[in-house]
Amino acid sequence: MPISSKVAEKIVVAGGGMVGAAAALSLARLGHPVTLIDRHRPQDGPRGLGIDIRNVALSPGSHGLLAQIEAWPARTAPYQRMDVWEQWGAAGIQFDAKSMHRDELGWLVEVAELSEKLWSRLDESPLVNLIFGDIAAVGLADHQVELTVVPPADSGSRETQIVPAELLLAADGSNSSVRSLLGVATQSLPTHQVALTTVVKTTCPHGSIARQRFLLDGPLACLPSVDPHISSIVWSQSPAAGERRLNLSEHDFKEALGLALEYRLGRIEAVAERFVFPLNQQLAETPLPHPRVVLLGDAFRVVHPLAGQGVNLGFEDIRHLLPYVAAQRTFDQPGLLSAYARRRHRRSQAMIDLLGGLRQIYAQASPAFALARNVGVGWVNGQHWLKRKMMFEAMGLTD
């Protein structure tokens, strides 16, 4: 595709989700004019028992990034402890913020709350220009990238825009248009699982504790909300089990979930609408498919939700990218982002391997294997130095 003679924008961000919006605001904070392209503003998601059913666990590292751009939402649910245990055996691991001399390990944040805060900051920023439309083509040249943007089908407009950029950050999700248009090879890593998500009310308070039980069919996470009796559920399981539990009566589902949690929160009093979606991990061959194009967040990699690292890795991408572009007034320096790309690819591959390994370890039903697993878990739980290192990593406080 021929490249136009229009003056290029300094930086264009494709995708206005949580990672894209945070990237645009972080760059604007450094004084860079940014153009953000998305199909539309964030849409409301399903709600249940008074909260957004969609939520994310944010690490202290992510909190630091969002606080810098003044986008930390007012309504968050901090958790001070995380309890992990399994279906077979009595051994478990407990992670406690007090051992880290902190008040919390992380926060559960409703997606709607965070998105609204980020977009209110985008609207306020004089350095952020918003364009609504779909990216239909990406042209590449040594000195710029050129995006062809068509208006949304429901906009009533037929005017196509050509948006040249010196640097393109693609944060347009797991089905990234930019990645697809550039033909970036992407490895699909099927988990053969789905996630069942909902919100529940329990007779006992959650106590600001995040809980995860590894069942043979997949991990079950029970995450605290701002209401002491309301928790979010993310239950990874086989597609057949997910379909069966989706279709259970409300009474039978409450009983099944209470049993799966070993009634650690008492009985399930109420349950919101249930949703099931497939879980697939994927990794692009590089986060830097062109010297002027960077893939961020889910556009680069998608990981299993069992460790709650998905959006945190996207925010981590931003934190690691900023030092490379902070002082740049032009992006013509050869190899400017090569070191960044190598580090982020290694980090992402390691995370995918780790999460895959954990799922495989806990899926083994052999009594001998379960015994060995329990001995190993019990040993890890007694090694405070090792648990501190694991927490530092999960909290985004180290690389």
Image (cartoon, helix red, strand yellow):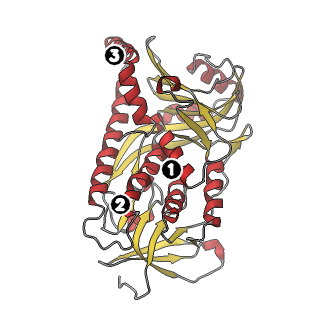
Q: Earlier in the sequence, mark 2 or mark 1?
A: 1
Query: On the picture, is 220 further left or further right than 365?
Result: right
Q: Earlier in the sequence, mark 3 or mark 1?
A: 1
- Give the residue number, with chain letter if any, for mark 2: 324
| Rendered residue at 39%/19% (across/down) | 384
Q: Say what amino acid the circle numbered 2 marks.
A: Tyr
Between the C-alphas of marks 2 and 3, the distance is 41 Å
- Measured as percent of width and height from the top left, residue 373 is found at 35, 16
- Give the residue number, with chain letter if any, for mark 1: 65
Is there a contact, CB below 8 Å, between mark 2 and mark 1?
no
Residue 197, by quadrant, is: top right
Q: Nearer the viewer, mark 3 or mark 1?
A: 1
Depicted 305 relative to depicted 67: above or below: above
- Measured as percent of width and height from the top left, residue 266 is found at 67, 17
Identify the mark at residue 376; answer none if there is no mark: 3
Q: Say what amino acid the circle numbered 1 marks.
A: Leu
Q: What quarter of the picture does the C terminus occupy?
A: top left
| Rendered residue at 39%/35% (across/down) | 393
Identify the mark at residue 329; answer none if there is no mark: none
